[in-house]
Image (cartoon, helix red, strand yellow):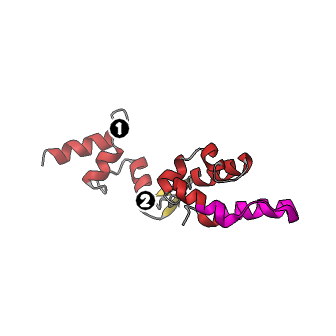
Amino acid sequence: MLFKDLEVRKILTDYNESLGESAELDVEKVCGALTKAGGGVEAVAKELSYEEITKAGVPPAVARAIAGVWRASRVEEKPVAKPDMPEVQVGGVEGTFKGLALAIGNVTAFGDKELIEIYEPLGAATVMAELLVRSER
């Protein structure tokens, strides 16, 4: 079976339909030749040049389309990051509870890992002071 078999067969079928009654490609024969050339293995199919694909009996433009399907990489959807805490609004300032706590300098609610993650040498002195207090314990 070909890598991305349905997509390749659709390209070949659409090409034949565009020619009307003079359809010249035998889809099964072409798919068999592509499989023999390595088109059944994803890593190999992605490396086949369109010149190699034309040897299976397809025109260069169709071979380029097949190569494009094989080489296309899917963009993985990244999950949307959820805030640690629900969003809040105090006056004209909004953000997470932890973000607001940091803004007003209340860093005692943060864990050690969170303090280290938000630490910036030129940032808030409250974070550095809290880290010093905790290091002396």
Q: Position of residue 114 (x, y in %)?
A: 31, 52
Specify whether residue 26 is painted magenta: yes
Look at the image and tell me in which quarter the N terminus lies.
bottom right
- Neighbor class of circle 2 (other Cα within 10 Å; few <14, some 14-19, many 20+) is some
Q: Quadrant of residue 29?
A: bottom right
On the image, numbered disc 2 is attached to which residue? Answer: 97
Q: Main secondary structure of the magenta part?
A: helix
Residue depicted at x 68% and y 47%: 64
Identity of the residue drawn at 51% across and 55% down: 38
Q: Is residue 107 visible?
A: yes
The three-letter code of the residue at mark 1 reads Glu
Amino acid tagged 2 = Phe
Quarter-wise, where is residue 132 in the image?
top left
- Residue where numbered disc 1 is placed: 120
Q: Which residues are magenta?
A: 8-32
What residue is shown at x 54% (from left), y 50% (from top)? 46
Residue that extends furthest to the top in the rendered view of this protein = 122
Closest to the observer, 136 or 69: 69
Q: Residue 131 occupies which quadrant of the picture?
A: top left
| x then y, percent, for residue 8 | 65, 61
Q: Which sits in the foreground, 37 or 125?
A: 37
